[in-house]
Amino acid sequence: MGITIRDVAEAAGVSTATVSRALRGLPNVDERTRRRVQQVASDLDYVISPSASRLASGRTGSVAVVTPYIARWFFCTVLSGVEDVLQEADMDLLLTCIGDHNNQLNRSPVAPRLRRRVDAILVIAVPPSDPQLREIIDLGMPTSTIGLTVPGVPSVTIDDVAAARLATQHLINLGHRRMGIIGGSPSEAPFTAESDREKGFSQALTAAGLDVDPILEAFGYFTIEGGEAAMTALLSQPTPPTAVFALSDEMAFGALRALRAHGLRPGVDVSIVGVDGHDMSEHLDLTTVVQPVTELGRIAAESLLVQLREGTPTLEPIRVPTQLVVRGSTGPLPGLSRD
Amino acid sequence: MGITIRDVAEAAGVSTATVSRALRGLPNVDERTRRRVQQVASDLDYVISPSASRLASGRTGSVAVVTPYIARWFFCTVLSGVEDVLQEADMDLLLTCIGDHNNQLNRSPVAPRLRRRVDAILVIAVPPSDPQLREIIDLGMPTSTIGLTVPGVPSVTIDDVAAARLATQHLINLGHRRMGIIGGSPSEAPFTAESDREKGFSQALTAAGLDVDPILEAFGYFTIEGGEAAMTALLSQPTPPTAVFALSDEMAFGALRALRAHGLRPGVDVSIVGVDGHDMSEHLDLTTVVQPVTELGRIAAESLLVQLREGTPTLEPIRVPTQLVVRGSTGPLPGLSRD
DNA sequence: ATGAAAGCGCTAACAG
DNA sequence: CTGTTAGCGCTTTCAT
């Protein structure tokens, strides 16, 4: 079943080799021959067999995308950027979810599954300490990471430290002095974004001559509910913060909710700033540092394709700029004279 | 490069055929032989070449997922269910986004790309009128749809008509009589969910002896902004509706926002009900008809795998139950005596 | 510019 | 239960 390159060759009166060349756009084929072959192929409704082509050439024409989550805003948004570019390049996209410590998938290791199956791998924001990450990198194929930096591996990220500084500085500029932070999880297997954003927060405070008070840190596990719980915890302190930096928009959403539950007005009684530029942030009037997430995916995929073609990885991490978008969730320190 | 089945065969002192059988768990292999082969294979760090296996067997071991969107809640949530099941079954998942009329991707048609590349196809909620859909189905391979029904093609959906009736009846029970609806888009290429939910809305109204007033329909294009605009339009009418059924949660979110912008309280001044059970609906206190989206994906993938194994498609559409979750966005008709 | 021919690494009869 | 033997459909030297 299925018509083969041989059928096309016969019908076109050439050898299979010529058909192969003609159809792949290789040089050294007479233009008239090429056109005839193309015509015959399309007349016969010929479709190349990828398996055969892969076996013979050694290339699979596919890229694996490895991610800890699929149904989360950041991840599926990156994914859509990646998909767009790969599709354009006529590459197959193999999707694999590996979960993380919050999301145990109890699956067999990915790395072996990828071995002879793809030409390259794109890893989205897994915690750098994830053992699977090492195995993937050790596969030795072209690999690139998004939202995560591993020494020696090409990566595309925002400058998380700078983004956090930006957010925190905004709060400082508004006159806030008692600053809270909603982090991911206490230390274990932190994401790159996690540690870097905490760092930026500290840097900004320190630069402004403020103390980093560990009591003003709560953990939201990058979920809405987590953010809500964290904010609730912060609010229950003797002297709650007047402004809070949430490491992600989703946690900030939860924080906003906690605020309302306490009868506090965001941006008036307590300020909240997030990081992400989540679709909903505008809707919820959240001040946030916007990162171009789709672009992250797109750029990573593109640089991976280049690496596949040229063979030379872009070792210097690619940093994509972010932007502070001020909305209603942040405002001047209450009691501060307006001006 | 790469070690082959022959290396394993030699090292184990058997033929390649036996190695192949042993490693694939086929019967008619002595258990001791099998174990020895497995041992040798793992010692040698042998990984089968999928391309070779595919070429020889004619099976690709992969399933394509075709979707109009990746970075949208419904779609990525379905996708994660699908991925989970396919992974479990050790099948590769090839992701392809084809866009829709709102999201022109200007790509080459998918169907040919899928031809010899996958064993089966899963289509997520494309409009039934999408020409690409026909081409995909006409490929003649095992195909199954999610959130979309095509006669003769296995599908997994909720009962959209019933879901809409449920939502609408809830509003009726609360005493509302002047009911608005936020639809997707005016007629062109409607999604199955779109037409069916409108139908359910009408049915419920008619059953309650109420008129369906076309002036109370606005379109939100399944986005937050669209929902906001639609609600704004409804509110600007001489006699605005007291309750509105939004065909999706995301549009309902926009409607809530429009309400607030007009100084109206959801569930008090105007009631809003959605469909989906979006992550954010709880957070935004939206009454909604929850559909088990991850399950939709999971069930579809599972039935597709069965079809692949048994060869017999489940032609009767699989209907997954939904559930009304009442929250603060709906309340009794204003002015109605409490009781 | 084109063709001949040798595989790529595996599976699937068919024997035994 | 195991081995032998053809391919699967393409790509790729190497000739011509």
Image: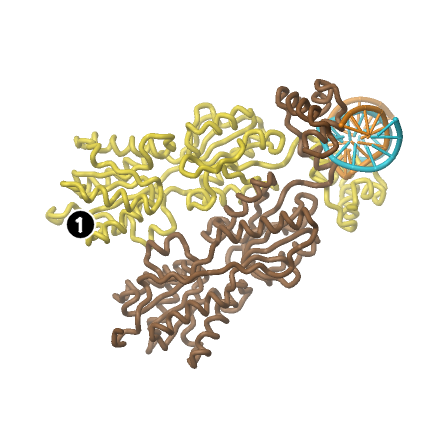
Chain colours: A brown, B yellow, C orange, D cyan
Say how many tags the image has: 1
Q: Is residue B1 above or below residue A238?
A: above
Residue B67 location (% of width, % of height): 48, 38
Residue A192 in view: yes
- The residue drawn where x is 64% and y is 34% is B60
Q: Quadrant of the N terminus of chain A?
A: top right
A102 sits to left or right of B55: left
Which residue is the site of mark 1?
B269
- The residue drawn where x is 41% and y is 62% is A324
Q: Nearer the viewer, residue D12 or B140?
A: D12
Q: Nearer the viewer, residue B50 or B169?
A: B50
Quarter of image, res A129:
bottom right
Residue A264 location (% of width, % of height): 27, 67
A237 sits to left or right of A94: left
Residue D1 location (% of width, % of height): 79, 35
Q: Is residue B237 above or below residue C13?
A: below
Residue B26 in view: no
Residue A171 location (% of width, % of height): 37, 71
- The residue drawn where x is 56% and y is 57% is A156
B297 sits to left or right of A106: left
- Disc 1 marks a residue whose amino acid type is Asp
Q: Secondary structure at mark 1?
A: loop
A240 sits to left or right of C8: left
Q: What chain does mark 1 sit on?
A: B
- The residue drawn where x is 69% and y is 51% is A141
Q: Residues within 10 Å of mark 1 (few under 14, many from 20)?
A: some
Q: Quadrant of the C terminus of chain A?
A: bottom left
